[in-house]
Image (spheres, rainbow, N blue to C red):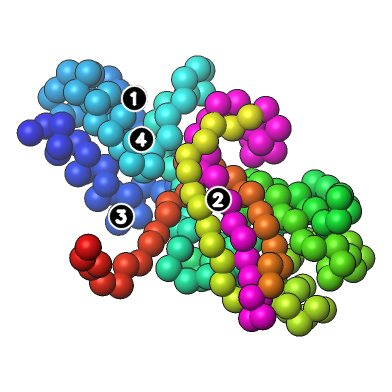
Amino acid sequence: MKYAQIIAQIEQAIADGDLAPGDRLPPERALAEEHGVSRMTVRQALQSLEARGLLRRSIGRNGGSFVARPKVERDLGTFSGLSEQLARQGVVAGARVVSAGEVDGAVEIVRVRLADGEPFAVERSSFPADRFRALLDLDLSGSLYDLLEEHFDAAPVRAVERIEPVLADADDAAALGLRAGAPLMLVDRVAYDSAELVVETARDVFRGDRTRIVAWTSELVRV
């Protein structure tokens, strides 16, 4: 089936490194002639690859089909900060502080998280002010969990996270360089220290086009 062959050929070229992130594919007309199929068949194959996150497509004078950057995995099997998770995947983590202050008894910190220098997520974290007010005097551009451990002996050891798809509002879209209404992954989190005290509540949104959720299961539970 020509449709599947086009997909397989492009997939293999990406896997072998013949096509790198950012590379532009030939126009639909050229691909159709190369494979002896209609442009509609080519378009369907490219749409399938785009839906799987392997390509990104744009319209206009500089538009076309481009190899997408690999998705960053958000591992739910083990609890760790985003900086550590990105580092394990060979991605350079960064953060840009949007705001930080005390509101209604909590230290609230809003940051845009960066993956290899590109906006990847917006973090909105709150910490009990009576314990963590001094966070506001520290450098907030790195791992907040490292700061909790080093300065407060209150490293989070576990968390409850709830995930759902949402659409970007105007503020998140502007922070992440997306259009309003673009798909995001919302993660609501409550993190606890070894004494079972809440150290953080958070509401983070991740770019849907750059994020893959990974969850490890241990055994089948029968009811």
Disc nearest the viewer among 4 and 1: 4
Rounded to the nearest whole Å, what is the CA distance between mark 3 and mark 4? 15 Å
Q: Which residue is mark 4?
A: 50
Residue 32 drawn at (x, y percent): 21, 23
Amino acid type assigned to the residue bearing label 3 in the image = Ala
Q: Residue at x 14, y 38 (%)?
A: 5
Q: CA distance from mark 4 to mark 1?
A: 15 Å
In reply to whether residue 156 is colored magenta, the answer given is no
Mark pair 1, 3: CA separation: 21 Å
Residue appearing at x 42%, y 54% in the figure: 213
- Quadrant housing the C terminus: bottom left
Q: Secondary structure at mark 1?
A: loop
Kindly identify which residue carries mark 2: 187
Q: Earlier in the sequence, mark 3 or mark 4?
A: 3
Q: CA distance from mark 4 to mark 2?
A: 24 Å
Q: Is residue 14 visible?
A: yes
150 vs 189, left or right, is: right
Inspect this view and state whether residue 87 appears.
no
Residue 133, placed above or below residue 102 = below
| Nearest-to-viewer mark from 2 and 3 | 2
